[in-house]
Image (tube, grey):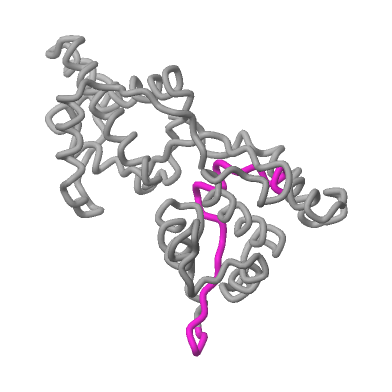
Amino acid sequence: MSQKRRKSAVPSSQNRTVRSSLAQDDGPEDFSFTQPSSSQVQRGLERLTPAQVDRKMAEVVQFILIKDQKKVPIKRADIVRHVVKEYRNIYPEIMKRVTRTFEQVFGLNLVEIDTKNHVYILINKLEPASGELASMSPGDHRTGLLFVILSIIFMKGGVVKESVVWNTLKKLRVEPGEKHEDFGDVKKLVTEEFVRQKNLEYVRIPHTDPVEYEFRWGLRAETEVSKLKMLQFVSELHDQEPQSWTQQYKEATSSEGTSSQRPQPL
């Protein structure tokens, strides 16, 4: 999703340290980490200088920014393992400062989208394009393609077979089996990159032979994308009012009304 240009949060020496941490493979999902109590955090802070805490906070900010360049969700386990390390006893305080930095310096929200596995993303509310996909700037091509796919899924009731998506894209002269000038390998972009970014879910349909897959909205899309604005976008394309699609309009307005229940910034 489009985000404003970001400033460097840490000195170059820290940048190199964080990048070397990123070069390591992610560890096992069951990485052991117990959230410290408030008293443990307080004792940990008493043993450190403010400069030490701020430096570690800056390293975490840089780690998340680098991860987010590829829109890869960030795991708490990776933050602790690769960056926080021996400062884990003050992890809550570090993350509190990290979250505040993203909000105040970058205008972004750090959101925990998976509370069970502690997975985070940086979000910037997506503003849908007002008009035809062709009117988007070159830098928006991938966002435009994603937006089209999300709109197909939404208009089809929240889940759609893979074949429906490919057939619709073919009508837009985007062939999944060919190299595209703007998108490269379209199928890989859609089924791997968009999925890894948590923008889409690509799920095998049980008991199908030959095997079939279906698409759903991913956790990032559910968090960032306004269904009402998406419906308005589709309505403009068809020169109709949003209310013309009764089911979708009801879902979109209901979604806007309950947006406060979506995952909130830390």
| Residue at x 30%, y 37% (from the top left corner) | 66
Q: Is residue 99 above or below residue 83?
A: above
Depth check, front residue: 136 or 163: 136
Q: Is residue 221 magenta?
A: yes
Q: Is residue 236 above or below residue 263?
A: below
Task: Magenta stretch: give its range.
Answer: 207-230
In the rendered structure, the answer to whether residue 141 lies left or right of residue 21 reads right
Which quadrant is home to the C terminus? top left
Q: Is residue 84 above or below residue 202?
A: above
| Residue at x 59%, y 72% (from the top left corner) | 166
User: In the displayed image of the protein, which residue is found farthest to the bottom?
Assistant: 209
Residue 62, percent from left and from top:
28, 30
Residue 204, percent from left and from top:
48, 74
Give the quarter of the image for residue 253: top right
Q: Is residue 204 magenta?
A: no
In the rendered structure, the answer to whether residue 62 lies left or right of residue 179 reads left
